[in-house]
Every structure is written in C-alpha cells, then in structure tokens.
Amino acid sequence: MPSSVVAHFEYNTDTKTLTVSFVSGKVYDYLHVPEKIYKEMRATISKGTYLNRRIKGKYPFEEIK
C-alpha cells in the first residue's frame, strides 16, 4: 500500500543513512540508523507511522536540498 506521507526511501549500508523522500517533495537523511530499523520500515504497512514512532526524534537528520 502506498504511503500518504513517504514517497520513497532508501538505505546506505556503508554510511547507515536512511534517505526519505516525502510526498511534499522534501528529502531528509536520517543518520546512524541501524540496518534493522530500515528492514523493519521496509516490512511495515504504514511507513509514515513507523517513521514517526521509530525514527523521528531518535536519530540525527539533515534536510537534503
């Protein structure tokens, strides 16, 4: 099921960076994210809910321009 918030996301195993593209067009890198968290997000039905509960506020981030 497509997310109403998250358009796309990908993970870099070398840098442990989760890049999230939002439906709004904004893109953020979440840093130091364990691969386990990425795999859980990939497997969950609600990407936006998972992001809010398990990633936002727990990992440093930066907006990508």
Image (cartoon, helix red, strand yellow):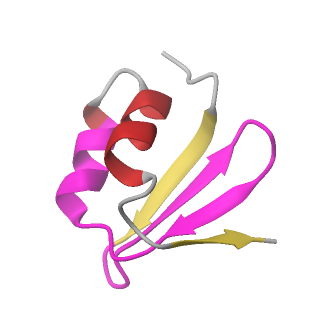
Q: Residue 63 at what x, y percent from top left? A: 70, 69
Q: Residue lying at the far front in this picture: please name it.
A: 57
Measuring 45% from the left and 39% from the top, which residue is drawn there? 52
In the rendered image, the residue lying farthest to the bottom is 14
Residue 4, given in percent of the width and then of the height, sits at 63, 22
Query: Residue at left 80%, top 39%?
Result: 24
Snapshot quadrant of residue 46: top left
Q: Looking at the image, which is closer to me, 61 or 65?
A: 61
Compared to residue 38, the image places residue 5 above or below, namely: above
Magenta stretch bounds: 13-42
Residue 39 is inside the magenta segment: yes
User: Is residue 23 shown left or right of residue 44?
Assistant: right
Which x, y percent locates residue 38?
Answer: 30, 53
Q: Is residue 26 magenta?
A: yes
Q: Is residue 26 shown left or right of residue 2?
A: right
Residue at screen point 25% across, 53% down: 37
